[in-house]
Image: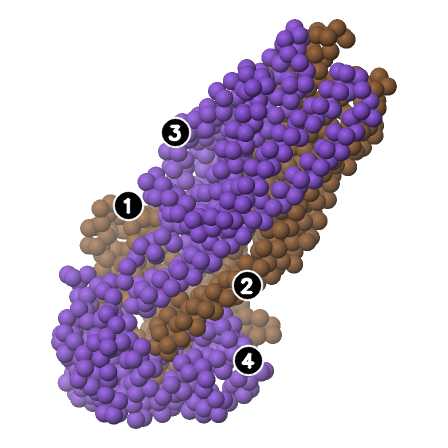
Chain colours: A purple, B brown
Amino acid sequence: MARRSGPMPRSTGKALGVWLQSQATRVRAPLTAAVGVGAVDGLLIIGQAGLLALIINAVAIEGHGLRTVWPWLWWLLGVFAARAIAAALIETTAFEAAARVKLAIRTELYAHIQALGPGWARGQRSGDLTNTLVDGVEALEKYYAAYLPQMRLALFVPIAILIVVAPTDWVSGLIMLITAPLIPLFMIIIGKGAEQLNQRQWRRLARMSAHFFDAIEGLTTLKLFNASRREAEVVAHMADDYRTSTMAVLRVAFLSSLILEFLASLSIAMIAVYIGFRLYDGEMLFLPGLFVLLLAPEFYKPLRNMGTQYHARMEAIGAAEQIVDIFNTRAAENKPEGSAVLDNTKPLEVVFEDVGFAYHIDQPVLEHINFTLEHGQRIALVGASGAGKTTLSQLLLGFISPSRGLIRVNGVDLREVANTVWLEKVAWLPQRPTLFHGSVLDNIRLGTPDADIAAVRQAATLANAATFIDALTAGYDTPLGDRGQGLSGGEIQRIALARAFLKDAELVVLDEASASLDPDAERLITESIERLARDRAMLVIAHRLDTVRRADRILVLDQGRIVEQGDHETLLAAGGRYADMLGLYRSTPT
Amino acid sequence: MKELLRLLQLFRPYWRAMLAGIGLSAAVVLTNVALLAVSGWFITAMALAGLGMGTINYFTPAAGIRALAIIRAVGRYGERLVTHDATLHGLAELRGWFYQHLEPLAPARLQFYRGGDLLSRIRADIDTLDNFYLRVLAPSVAAAFSVLLMTAFITLYSGPVALINLAGLLAAGLVLPLWAQWLGNAPGERAVSRRADLRAAVADSVRGLGELEVYQASARQAATIDRLGAELIAPQRQQARIDGLSSALSGLASRLTLWLALLVVIPLVASQQLGGADLAMIAFFVLAGFEGVAALPLAFQSLGETFAAARRIFEIVDAEPMVTDPSHEADLPAKFDIEFKQLRMRYAPDGGWALDGIDLKVAAGARVAIVGPTGSGKTSLFNVLLRFWGYQEGSLDLGGQPLTGFSGETVRSWCAVVAQQTHLFNASVRDNLLLACPDASQDALIAALRQACVYDEIAALPQGLDTLVGEIGARLSGGQARRVAIARALLKDAPILLLDEPTEGLDVTSEQAVLQALEALMIGRTTLLVTHRPQALRYVDHVVVLGRGRVLEQGKPAALLQGGQYLPSYASIN
């Protein structure tokens, strides 16, 4: 999970707590069952204390032997068995609740990410999204499996004990009644004071940790400057500083546990001493006295455990923050699902008419883009990173819609066409194509899951991929793992090319890989792209000299505008921006 | 076990604090047991005295009960302080130790651990070891100690009860947790591997969101994620059941112990071998005693993680450095020309050659560009030159003397490096610059920044040179960071300049500024420039194209760009 940059404000924490609570309504039944079983266990605790008191009273005071107390002992055994069953049931039912919440949230979260679309995802770190979907959702488990049921029981069990104790011995009941609310109260008061200190400490820990790992990460740089040994002292010094300051904070922070223990232990002691003296004076019977003393530690136990549960809540809130962030993101302008039909008889013609795009109104990414892409034509986009090449290709793919102007496909405004209809005609090869979990075969027929093997083979052959696929251990059935494990960059690209050949789309959008491959792989891919370009329209985001030379037309983008267009020879002869980019001509040699 | 001893060895300077913490935690448990046992004994004895069946001096136990309550509360506070102080001492020690051992190994040895993300693994492992004392050592030693004392105490009343109690404690504290852990191994491993599957599928789906949409496979992928999520639940459910069962059985063990103890003690009371108050005392004692082993399941769980973390950390630390320095340093060279002769190097004895017979001569003060695809040997060339790695065949001379005649530190003092992955530390701009030259004056720093064409931008930052950069402070843009690194290299004033893709990923304006800054830096220095940018080639006299560790072609930049066989397809224009 991405580390949070610091503690969040209280209000945010509270809002996230409310969100977590609201998700519990999905699993009211198993959660209630878990709490119900816990409540039964609470009653069994009282029964256990009663039976023990009866047995000890009979033996110690009334002088009976084993024979008399046998029935109670058997009952006691029954209670023990029942408590064991309850303990197992609580944990398993609460887990079911947590499991259902996790599954539902993950499904909805991924659906939401799909709805936000690739245009949005491009601006996110994909690693962070993955972590939120996997680890973030998993981190919610303890909240529903432990925190929620335990917190409800922390209320029920002490109250049930109090109801039994108060009529038996009102003084002990009073001691419990007074001290119990004091425990959370003091914890809150001290907790609030400690929280500020804690936040400062949290930042200090983050800084110390960051420094240490920064030094490790930058070890090569430190060595380059022969400064790595100097740094060792700094590392030791910082850790020691951190220790001193942390201890100052902990001295305060642990006060809450001091108070907690103090109240709980002292209350038990007071109850014991008080009962003892009344027994001595004959003001009370032994049986109720012992019964109350047996229940006293059970009364404080759930309150003592609250601290551990609190941790589960904090963890869940940390995870919920990222999840809720994504849920709260709305798609910028959801494109209305258009109903226009494309004329499939005419050859494809795409026209950009004065297209502009901006994420924020005052920062246009693209402005006044005009060009036409026809069937059989290959257009190369060049320009520095940030010039708008990717945004332009995303507009063409329908991931985002123009803020100004319009894109016409065979005369129809692309906005009027449903994405599913338009993308039927399109194949896309991103810079680093994604191979999905599954076999080579599954991956090639990603768009057409029912394509037959002969068609897949043909596509692979056209993509210059057939030879290496046949050489794989299981051929087309070879499973591809995480990011196409075992395949080289060039092989992954050729599988993506096969995917495009199989789709046989009218328009191909190709984002050329910027990392170059070894000469042989490069040749195989270039050859296959040449084949793919034939008899289609193609838009290439080009990175290499070789590629642009082959384009019919080159659009040179600079800061969101087309500054030059033409073919390689023309642009080179013009001696403008394009020629400058190629670095071939320079008036003053250095 | 070996790891355990080494870990203990590491924490040895703080053994007093650690022992004190362990003593305190045992004391806290024992006072709680005593509090309840004495209370039970007290009320029974008082009741018996009240009924005229005995006498009692009630002052001592009554005061004792109150004292125990206070000792317990204060002891708990002290325990937490002492154990945390010991932990923090250990943490400081551990980090210092780890850094010192890692330093000689970087970067060569660390390269081999790239499998997982080395850094995040080290981070997690060090965090785990930080908690070794608090989570594993202190609770288990304290538990062992308390169990022994409790057993000894009950023996005074009844040997059989002491044995029953010991058996119960062992069952709840040792046998059941270990049994649950053993049962949980298989589902645990399944959960880990299914979670990895889910992660891989999710990562693909998020990365390939656009491809799924274009190829209209989004719904199918969502169903796959749902299925993998559900498959992950199955082993987790098994684990939850095992956990539920083991905690139910632990509870049952503690209560059965009480039950059996009652069976033994009741006849003893009936036959007056033990008093009635002793029965109550033993009942409370047994019930409360199980708190002493409550922390053990968690300790056992962490134990495995701790050993695994320790093993990995020790494995890293125990590696031999890749390059050994000569015992006698050769004389300082008069000029800094570089000559590779049929140089071959590989990273592993059974690996392929990363450099496969390189012949390259760079005259002192010359500027040479190196171009080639990923894996062609560009970075290896620098690694060899910087004495980060050794080489197996051929020779590499610096100023006419074999490079191996100099120590790594000496060689690196002659080289200024601007790398693609320039690391700026989480510190001020000033501190980052001072790294190159700890006693540079303010004027020298400003001059270097100016020369690197970045001074105006740094001066415009709210805190100027004292602005924090990196993860914690304000982020500099990629171009600014690169130019700060160039300023740092300028401050170093070394005769050899190694530039590894210094303009990669920069926009046009930044690239121009960086190249201009570099131009100033190159004057009078022997320069090797790794790049795939045609713009950068304007600044060099000679270009070498590498492929698979060999020189594919070389010559004047303009000529090769126009008519070369390889350079045009490797020169990236954007």
- Are dots 2 and 4 on a single chain? no
Indicate the chain on which mark 3 is placed. A
B464 or A156, nearer to the observer: A156
Instruction: Assign a secondary structure to mark 4.
Output: loop
Instruction: Assign a secondary structure to mark 1.
Output: helix
- Which amino acid type is shown beneath numbered disc 3? Gly
**Alpha carbon separation for disc pair 2 and 3:** 45 Å
- Of the residues tagged 1 and 2, which is closer to the observer? 2
Q: Residue at point 44% right, 66% down?
A: B203
- Are dots 1 and 2 on a single chain? yes
Residue under label 1: B466
The answer to which quarter of the image holds residue B498 is bottom left
Residue under label 3: A193
- Which amino acid type is shown beneath numbered disc 2? Glu
**Alpha carbon separation for disc pair 4 and 3:** 60 Å
Above/below status of B240 relative to B572: above
Residue under label 4: A478
Q: Are marks 2 and 3 in contact (CB under 8 Å)?
A: no
**Alpha carbon separation for disc pair 4 and 1:** 56 Å
Instruction: Assign a secondary structure to mark 2.
Output: helix
Mark 3: few/some/many CA within 10 Å (<14, 14-19, 20+):
few
- Are dots 3 and 1 on a single chain? no
Q: Are marks 1 and 2 in contact (CB under 8 Å)?
A: no
**Alpha carbon separation for disc pair 1 and 2:** 53 Å
Percent of width and height locating residue A137: 45, 55
Percent of width and height locating residue A455: 45, 91
A57 or B35, nearer to the observer: A57
Residue under label 2: B231
Q: Quadrant of the C terminus of chain B?
A: bottom left
Q: Is residue B315 visible?
A: no
Q: Residue at point 47% right, 58% down?
A: A103
